[in-house]
Every structure is written in C-alpha cells, then in structure tokens.
Image (tube, rainbow, N blue to C red):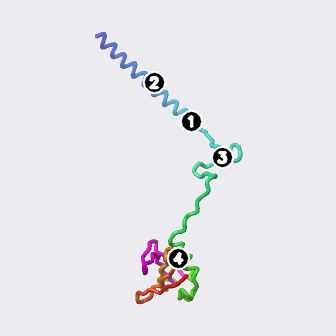
Amino acid sequence: MMILLKAFLFVIAIALVFGLLSWGLEKMGERGKKNDTVTPTAGAETPGATTDPSNPTDTPTPTPEPTLQDNARKVMQSVSKSKLKLSKEFSEYRAEIDDYTSIIKGTECVGVNVLESTQLVGIYWVAVDGSVIFRELENGEFETIEP
C-alpha cells in the first residue's frame, strides 16, 4: 500500500511540475506579445525611420518582358496604313490580339483582328520575331507584308 501511495504522489508531483512549466511559458508568451514594439531600422536613411521589408529599396524593380501582344501591336504600328491596306493608321482602330500563336506559312505568328467599331476591317498575322506580317485575304490566302 505504501508503494502505491508513493507512486501516486510521484505522478502528482510530475504533473504539477509540467503544469507549472506550461503555465509559466504561456504567461511569458503573453508578456512578449504585450511588449512587442520592435521598429525595424535596417537600411533606413534616417535614425528611427522604418522600411517596408516587403519592398526592399536596394533591389531594382525588374522591368516586365513585353508580351506577344505588345510586340505584335508595336510591329503593326510601325507599318504604314498603305502597306496594311487600311484607310486610317493602325492606332486609330481597335485591335483584338490573340494570346496564343498560330503557324502561318511555316512561321509562328500572333493573330491581330483590326476592327472599326464592331466591323472587322482586316485579319493580320504578325510573326513572333516581327520579321513579317501576313494579311489574310477573303479567299483564305495570305498576302505577305514586309514591316
């Protein structure tokens, strides 16, 4: 019986020690939260000034690469209206430019639909490398335009 009592008291003592440790660590964590007033100053030009860690000032912001659509628009704008067989400059029309490529006469191209209001004025295919433009004719054939 004495052995059982000693074992019981030992288990109670261990539980009490772990309970107190757990309670103490919890209280320490709460105290740290209340007094958590850290001001970052690394990299700040003036003392006490803060910096935004998500926007480092010593790293230049990369310039985004132009998209296929941007390149196709630039090529189309560089060609005269007479070469494109348009009555106005390309920039005066609304352009719907594909976000995918197609192969026209063995060349990877981006499709450009040129519209005036809602009426389709022309269908063009601009080579991804900007080397050539194909104008799609009504019969399904393609006319080559050198930019």
Per the rendering, the mark at residue 34 is: 1
Q: Residues within 10 Å of mark 1 (few under 14, many from 20)?
A: few
Residue, disc 3: 43
Image coordinates of residue 33 in percent, x first then y, are 55, 36
Image vertical order of residue 133 relative to residue 38, above or below: below
Residue type pointed to by label 4: Gly
Q: Main secondary structure of the magenta part?
A: strand
Residue, disc 2: 20
Q: Which residues are magenta?
A: 93-115
Residue type pointed to by label 2: Leu
Camera-nearest label, 4 or 3: 4
Q: Is residue 107 magenta?
A: yes
Whether pointer 2 and pointer 1 mark residues with C-beta atoms closer than 8 Å, the reply is no
Q: CA distance from mark 2 to mark 1?
A: 21 Å
Image coordinates of residue 24 in percent, x first then y, are 49, 27
Q: CA distance from mark 1 to mark 4?
A: 61 Å
**Along the horizontal axis of the image, is 5 left or right of 99?**
left
- Kindly give the residue lying farthest to the right in the view shown: 46
Camera-nearest label, 1 or 4: 4
Q: Residues within 10 Å of mark 2 (few under 14, many from 20)?
A: few
Q: Residue at x 41, y 87 (%)?
A: 140
Q: CA distance from mark 4 to mark 3?
A: 44 Å
N-term-proximal mark, 1 vs 3: 1
Image quadrant for the N terminus?
top left
